[in-house]
Each structure stands twice: as C-alpha cells, then as structure tokens.
Image (tube, grey):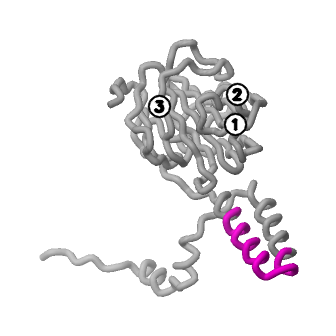
C-alpha cells in the first residue's frame, strides 16, 4: 500500500498558530544597524515637516520609508558548489573588461577580467565576499565622487580595495567605489580576517559601484546588462577557462 504523508503534531501546531501578522512580517526585510541613525534622522525630519505642512509630512514619510528600504539587509544563500565566485553586490553588471588591476590590491600586473556592478539607490548596498578565504589586503584610497558608471571612476573615485586569498592560493580583488551621491564606504572586516562565501564585508551609502577582479585566466559566465544578486549570483568559477561570448 502506498504511504500517505501526514503532518506532525509540531507542524500542525505551527500552522494553527500562524497568524496574519506572521504572514505580513515575513515580507519585511531587516535593516542593517548602520542605517538606524539615518532612518531615525529621516523620521524626525518627517515629524517636524508634518507640523509645518501635511504634504511635507507625507513627503517626509515617503523619504523615511525609502531610507529604511535602502538599508535593508536580506539573508542570502550562496550556492554550495566548490570553486564558485559569486557577485559581491546587488545591481546591474555595467562592464566586463580585461584590465590590469590597481596597485592597491597587491596583485600581479597581468591583465585580469574585471566585472563592474553598478548599484542604484534602490539596490541592496551590502557588499558580500565572492569567495571563502583570508583577507590579505585592505586599502582605503581617497578620491573624487564622479559618476560611478564612468570607467575612470575605478582610478579616480574614493574607494576601498580588498583582496581575498582562497585556500588554493587564488586571489580575488574587490573594490568598493563611491559615486555621485555616495559619500561613505563602510567596512565590517579587517586585514587578516577569514571570511566565508557570501559573508558581509561592507556597504556603500547611497549609490555606488563594486568591481571584482577574477583570477588570471578565469572567465565570467555573466553578461553586461544582467542583474546580479549579491552573495548568490554566480559570476564564474576558479579554474574556469570559458571564453566570453
């Protein structure tokens, strides 16, 4: 006779105790602690504006909700495949080029594939490690605040450079680049720390770009214009020699 599945007592209890509030709150994404003060500031400004004018108060409320949305910090679930390289940020892949990496990353002078991800003010701005390994270099470079989509932003804008070395000795470079609106790059890790694939290593406030430099000979499996999800979208894999099509 064919077995018939029956829910356990615990599953029945969870189902019975699941309320409408639980269903609604499941859709809300936590806010990163770095955003608390900004959300509070927007909320106070909205309250003051509402005392002056109802329409102004409404605009302030919308701005407060946007601020909370900007600092959202969703959980991400990196694939378990060995050797994969995942996107370090959410956003649109704006460029894929073969270039010499910046000196700050302390990589060799051979050309590597650089994947640039542009983060709009509506994207999640938490940056995540593309691989598991040890952080061998962190360098902050002051600079300009040009449009982050410009190619020269990689060399001229304020940025934070981070190099990660995997167990097999491969080195991947990540560069957080400030943009027209971004004025602060925040890093959660220190040089010498070990980090897991998809683990948070920093954020950039209010619009920016993140570059990732693949190991020599490693080619991407993504295209310009594709939308990346930080910590989940697979950009390539170590040892991959696929040509870009």
Q: Please name the residue shown 67% across and 34% down the image.
A: 193
Question: Distance of mark 1 from mark 2, alpha carbons?
Answer: 8 Å
What residue sits right under mark 1 in the picture?
146
Of the pair 162 and 97, the residue shown nearer to us: 97
Question: Distance of mark 2 from mark 3, alpha carbons?
Answer: 19 Å
Describe the element under mark 3 as helix, strand or loop: strand
What residue sits right under mark 2 in the picture?
156
Density class for disc 3 (Cα within 10 Å; few <14, some 14-19, many ≥20) is many
Check whether the beta carbons of the residues at disc 1 and disc 2 lie within 8 A of each other.
yes
Left or right: 123 as drawn, with respect to 185: left
Q: Please name the residue shown 58% across and 21% down the image.
A: 101
Of the pair 167 and 237, the residue shown nearer to us: 237
Q: Which region of the structure is painted magenta?
A: 49-67
Left or right: 164 as drawn, with respect to 41: left
Which residue occupies the extreme left position in the image?
1
Query: From the image, which quarter does the N terminus lie in?
Result: bottom left
Q: Is residue 62 above or below residue 213?
A: below
Q: Is residue 117 above or below residue 60?
A: above
Residue 227 shown in magenta: no
Of the pair 182 and 173, the residue shown nearer to us: 182
Query: From the image, which quarter does the C terminus lie in?
Result: top left
């Amino acid at each position: 006779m064919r077995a018939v599945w029956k829910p356990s007592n615990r599953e029945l209890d969870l189902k019975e105790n699941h309320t409408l509030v639980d269903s609604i709150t499941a859709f809300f994404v936590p806010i990163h602690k770095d955003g608390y003060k900004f959300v509070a500031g927007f909320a106070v400004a909205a309250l003051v504006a509402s005392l002056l004018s109802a329409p102004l108060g409404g605009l302030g409320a919308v701005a407060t909700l946007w601020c909370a949305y900007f600092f959202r910090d969703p959980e991400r679930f990196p694939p378990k495949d060995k050797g994969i390289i995942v996107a370090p940020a959410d956003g649109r892949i704006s460029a894929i080029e073969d270039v010499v990496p910046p000196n700050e990353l302390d990589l060799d002078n051979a050309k590597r594939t650089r994947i640039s991800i542009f983060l709009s003010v509506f994207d999640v701005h938490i940056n995540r490690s593309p691989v598991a390994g040890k952080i061998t270099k962190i360098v902050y470079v002051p600079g300009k605040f040009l449009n982050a989509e410009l190619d020269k932003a990689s060399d001229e804008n304020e940025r934070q450079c981070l190099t990660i070395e995997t167990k097999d000795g491969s080195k991947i470079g990540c560069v957080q680049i400030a943009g027209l609106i971004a004025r602060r790059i925040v890093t959660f890790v220190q040089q010498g720390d070990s980090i897991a694939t998809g683990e948070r290593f920093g954020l950039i406030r209010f619009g920016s770009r993140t570059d990732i430099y693949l190991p020599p000979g490693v080619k991407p499996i993504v295209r310009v214009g594709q939308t990346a999800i930080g910590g989940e979208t697979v950009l390539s894999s170590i040892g991959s020699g696929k040509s870009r099509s």
